[in-house]
Amino acid sequence: MAALVGAIEADCRLSELAVEAPTKISAKTIQKSVEKGCTIIAHSVISTQTNRIYGEIRDVRERFGASVTIVGGGAHASARPLELLENGFDYVVVGEGERSFPNLLWYLMNDKDPLEISSVVGKITEDCPKPKDLEPVDLDAHPPFALGMNIVGPIEVTRGCPYSCKFCCTPFLTGGRVRNRSIDNVVHWLTRAVESSGFNRTWFLSPNALSYGGRGRSVEAKKIEDLLRSVTKIDGLEEVFFGSFPSEVRPEFVTRDVLEMMQGYVANKTLQIGLQSSSDRVLKLANRHHTVKEGLDAINTALDSGFIPHVDMIFGLPGETKRELQESIDLCYSLAEMGAKTHGHVFMPLPGSAFENETPGILDSESRKLLGELSRKKLLTGSWSAQEAMAEDLSMRKS
């Protein structure tokens, strides 16, 4: 929301557009807008929220009919644009939205046909654009947040991932080419945020934080340090979080030198490390491109460097045996003894991922019991208990 509203604010063509950005839109708010004129409602849709969102769209349509134009975008919209149209949306933005969403708004405000925009779908057709076929967005060309409306949040410093982990839809959505927001651009927006809104801490978002400054397959330690040194010099910015949730780092990128360098700049005491399984066989099936040993080495290096590792694990990955599931849970207990914590997930067949047609993850009663024990001790975080039901729901709706 912050990035998209920021893109609207930066587009001089949209200066007359009245923007509201609540997380929930009431019928009363919509009614007031309809009374004033052309009303556009935009939803960013992820796969686990579709039941709620489609219900809201039905309610809006029943009450307001064609007096509102409903636009969808986001992860699920990009993977399933026709599904959104079938559930009441008028237009769907496929792929990255910083450029195409403001263009769509301008077309609607000027009675032009939005279907002239290559990334917009507005009718049931088999010929839908794919994110990989669209021109990638230059992060520096768009604000990371919306200072005019004081919607300030984390800054996305890298987008895209060269790895094709089969459980992940990031390669489908943002492509395999890694793009970096430049240090000068990051400093510019953080300085403005501090000066205008009292913003005093920032989180950097990245699918692999330790790939910043490069093409995603190696650590560029100097560029990472240049970034951290530059932003920590900003007057009024008190804390910088890098490599902690909701970002993560790939284990083979973790070295003692780079973590000890980070300790001189970052406020986070935790480091989010993506291990995902205790089985090399399962990691290979998921196309992770690293081994369990590399994951354990990274965890030990983080501990030795003064960070508390928060280790991402996915239970019920396709091809995982009952024994391998148990071994992954056993590893979570071992991690706790080492001083690490686990961020747990149950495998969900996400649309857009290579595993989207696989069977959802299922936990047996003993596995739930053991994971619940870790959760009660605050040694396991994440929405793993809810994700099992979400995964089943995704699979049922797909079929």
Image (cartoon, rainbow, N blue to C red):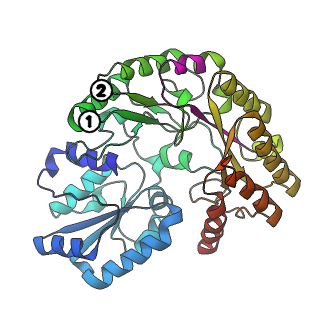
Q: Which residues are magenta?
A: 259-276
> Looking at this rendering, what residue extends furthest in the front direction?
377
**In this rendering, is residue 65 above or below 285?**
below
Q: Is residue 227 above or below residue 138?
A: above
- Picture coordinates of residue 214, whole percent (x, y): 51, 24
Is residue 166 at all visible to an observer of this figure?
A: no
SS for callout 1: loop
Identity of the residue drawn at 21% across and 36% down: 196
Pointer 2 with pointer 1, Cβ within 8 A: yes
Instruction: Based on the picture, tell me whether residue 270 belongs to the magenta stretch.
Output: yes
What distance separates the C-alpha of mark 2 from that of mark 1? 8 Å
Image x and y of residue 140, in percent: 33, 32
State the residue at coordinates (47%, 21%).
265
Q: Nearer the viewer, residue 266 or 254?
A: 266
Q: Quadrant of the C terminus?
A: bottom right
**Which residue is pictured at 78% across the width and 61% down the height?**
369
Residue 351 coordinates in the image, percent (x, y): 57, 60
Which residue is label 1 attached to?
198
Find the residue positioned furthest to the right: 323
> Mark 2 belongs to which amino acid?
Gly
Mark 2 or 1 closer to N-term? 1
Q: Which residue is mark 2?
A: 236
Q: Is residue 90 visible?
A: yes
Task: Identify the mark at residue 63; answer none if there is no mark.
Answer: none
Q: Quadrant of residue 90?
A: bottom left
